[in-house]
C-alpha cells in the first residue's frame, strides 16, 4: 500500500483519542484486495475498546450495480482426508486428535458426519495461505512438531535414471570436443527468421521451420533449424576476446513434420565454429575427423569404392560397400565457393548426408558483423544411434 503525505498527514493521524478508523483500499484484483482488507482489519480490530469489533461497509458498484458488504468474515469450508494427513506426516492419529492439532493453528475442524475418513475444516479469513489439503497437512505437522515426527527410511533404494541414448551420445561428443580445446556455448533455441535463413543465404520453403504464432520480439520468431545462428551471435558478442575463438554446441533443432501428432520433430545436432585471422578450415576438418574417429566411424577413401553421390539428405541402400564416412565438395550459398564439403555416412548399408562444413561466405560474415573468417561444422548426431 502507498501512504502519500496528503493522506498520511497530521489531520488524519491516529492517536489514543481516535474513536473511528476508516480503511479504504484500491486495486485491480478483487481477490487480493479482499485478502489484504481482511488481514488489515483483523489486525486493527484487536485494539478496539471491544476487541475484534468491526463495522462493515456496504459497497455499491456503479458500473454493474453490484452490492456487497465488506469485510466478509465468513469462514471458508473445506475437507481434508485423515489418511492423507497421516501418510504424509508418518502418523497414525485419530480424527479427534488431528482436530486438536488444527485448533492450535487457528483452524476449526471436526470429523465429518458423512465419512469417517474426512474432516470438515473451517478456515478463517486471516488464513489466506490455506489453499489445499496439503496446507492443512502442513499445519498438522507444525502443531505436532517437526522434531517429533517419526523418522523412517525409504522402503526402496534411491536410483539414478538411465540416460537416453541420444543424451549419452551428446555427452560423449561434448567431452571429446572440450578435451580438444573448444568451449561450449548455450544460445537460445529461438531466433529471428532472417537469422535462420536470409543471413545464412538460405531460402525458406515454408515447410521447414516452426514459426511462432505471436512472437513478442523480432529475435524470437522461429525455432532454429540450424545451430549456426546461435554460434555466430555468440562470436559477435565476444569479439573483444583474444583470437582465435573456438566454440561448439550440442543441442536440439526443430523441423516441421506433418506425419507426427505434434506436427514437428527435434533433431540433436553438433556444431562448431572457428573465428580467427586465418580461415581455420583445416581445424574444423580435424575436429570432424576426431569426433567421427571417437565414434568408431572410419574414413572411406576412393580405393574402397567411393563414388560421387547426389548431394541431398535422402537415405540410400548400398549393402555391398563398407561402413564409414566421406566428404564431397558442395556449392552452397552459405559457404565460400570451393571451400565447403558435405559429410556422408554409410552405416548398415544405408547412406545418408549427415552434415556439412566449410568457410562461411563473406555476406554471411557481414550480416553477423564479423571481421575475420569463420569456419563452421554441423552434423546430425541422431543418425549414429
Image (cartoon, rainbow, N blue to C red):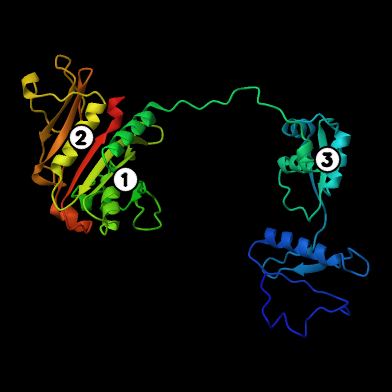
Query: Is mark 1 in CB contact (under 8 Å) with mark 2?
Result: no
Taking the spot 86% from the left edge, 31% from the top edge, the residue there is 94
Q: What crowding class fits label 3: few (fewer than 14 Cα within 10 Å), some (14-19), or many (20 or more)?
A: some
For disc 3, the marked residue is: 120
Q: CA distance from mark 1 to mark 2?
A: 22 Å
- 27 vs 105, left or right, is left
Disc 2 vs disc 3: which is toward the camera? 2
Q: What crowding class fits label 1: few (fewer than 14 Cα within 10 Å), some (14-19), or many (20 or more)?
A: many
Give the mark nearer the N terminus: 1 vs 2: 1
Q: Secondary structure at mark 2?
A: helix
What is the quadrant of residue 118 in the picture? top right
Q: What crowding class fits label 2: few (fewer than 14 Cα within 10 Å), some (14-19), or many (20 or more)?
A: many
Q: Is residue 170 above or below residue 224?
A: above
For disc 1, the marked residue is: 224
Q: Position of residue 332 (x, y in %)?
A: 13, 43
Is the N terminus in the top left, top right, bottom left or bottom right quadrant?
bottom right
Query: Is mark 3 in CB contact (under 8 Å) with mark 1?
Result: no
- 76 vs 245, left or right, is right
For disc 2, the marked residue is: 288
The reply to whether residue 112 is in sight is no
Q: Residue furthest bottom?
A: 11
Q: Is residue 199 above or below residue 116?
A: below
Q: CA distance from mark 2 to mark 3?
A: 68 Å
Give the mark nearer the N terminus: 3 vs 1: 3
Q: Residue furthest top?
A: 320
Amino acid at each position: 500500500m502507498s501512504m502519500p503525505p496528503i493522506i498520511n498527514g497530521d489531520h488524519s493521524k491516529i492517536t489514543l483519542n481516535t474513536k473511528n478508523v476508516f480503511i479504504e483500499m484500491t486495486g485491480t484484483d478483487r481477490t487480493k484486495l479482499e485478502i489484504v482488507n481482511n488481514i488489515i482489519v483483523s489486525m486493527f480490530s484487536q485494539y478496539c475498546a471491544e476487541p475484534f469489533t468491526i463495522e462493515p461497509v456496504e459497497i455499491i458498484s456503479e458500473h454493474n450495480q453490484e452490492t456487497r458488504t465488506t469485510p466478509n468474515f465468513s469462514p471458508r469450508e473445506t475437507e481434508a482426508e485423515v489418511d492423507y494427513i497421516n501418510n504424509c506426516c508418518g502418523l497414525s492419529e485419530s480424527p479427534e486428535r488431528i482436530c486438536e492439532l488444527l485448533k492450535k493453528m487457528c483452524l476449526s475442524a471436526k470429523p465429518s458426519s458423512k465419512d469417517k475418513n474426512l474432516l470438515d475444516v473451517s478456515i478463517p479469513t486471516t488464513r489466506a495461505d490455506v489453499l489445499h489439503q496439503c496446507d492443512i497437512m502442513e499445519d498438522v505437522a507444525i502443531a505436532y512438531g517437526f522434531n517429533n515426527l517419526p523418522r523412517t527410511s525409504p522402503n526402496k533404494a534411491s536410483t539414478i535414471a538411465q540416460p537416453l541414448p541420444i543424451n549419452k551420445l551428446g555427452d560423449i561428443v561434448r567431452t571429446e570436443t572440450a578435451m580438444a580445446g573448444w568451449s561450449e556455448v548455450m544460445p537460445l533455441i529461438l531466433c529471428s527468421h532472417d537469422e535462420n535463413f536470409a543471413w545464412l543465404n538460405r531460402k525458406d520453403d515454408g515447410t521447414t521451420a516452426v514459426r511462432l504464432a505471436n512472437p513478442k520480439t523480432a529475435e524470437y520468431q522461429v525455432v532454429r533449424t540450424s545451430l549456426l545462428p546461435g554460434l555466430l551471435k555468440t562470436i559477435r558478442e565476444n569479439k573483444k576476446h583474444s583470437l582465435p575463438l573456438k566454440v561448439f554446441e550440442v543441442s536440439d533443432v526443430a523441423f516441421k513434420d506433418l506425419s507426427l501428432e505434434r506436427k514437428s520433430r527435434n533433431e540433436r545436432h553438433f556444431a562448431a565454429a572457428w573465428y580467427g585471422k586465418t580461415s581455420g578450415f583445416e581445424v574444423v576438418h580435424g575436429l570432424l575427423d576426431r569426433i567421427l574417429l571417437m565414434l568408431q566411424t572410419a574414413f572411406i577413401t576412393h580405393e574402397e569404392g567411393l563414388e560421387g553421390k547426389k548431394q541431398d539428405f535422402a537415405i540410400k541402400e548400398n549393402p555391398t560397400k563398407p561402413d564409414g564416412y566421406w566428404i564431397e565438395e558442395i556449392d552452397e550459398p552459405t559457404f565460400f565457393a570451393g571451400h565447403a564439403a558435405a559429410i556422408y555416412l554409410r552405416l548398415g548399408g544405408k547412406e545418408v548426408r549427415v552434415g556439412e562444413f566449410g568457410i562461411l561466405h563473406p555476406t554471411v560474415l557481414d550480416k553477423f558483423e564479423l571481421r575475420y573468417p569463420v569456419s563452421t561444422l554441423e552434423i546430425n548426431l541422431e543418425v549414429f544411434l
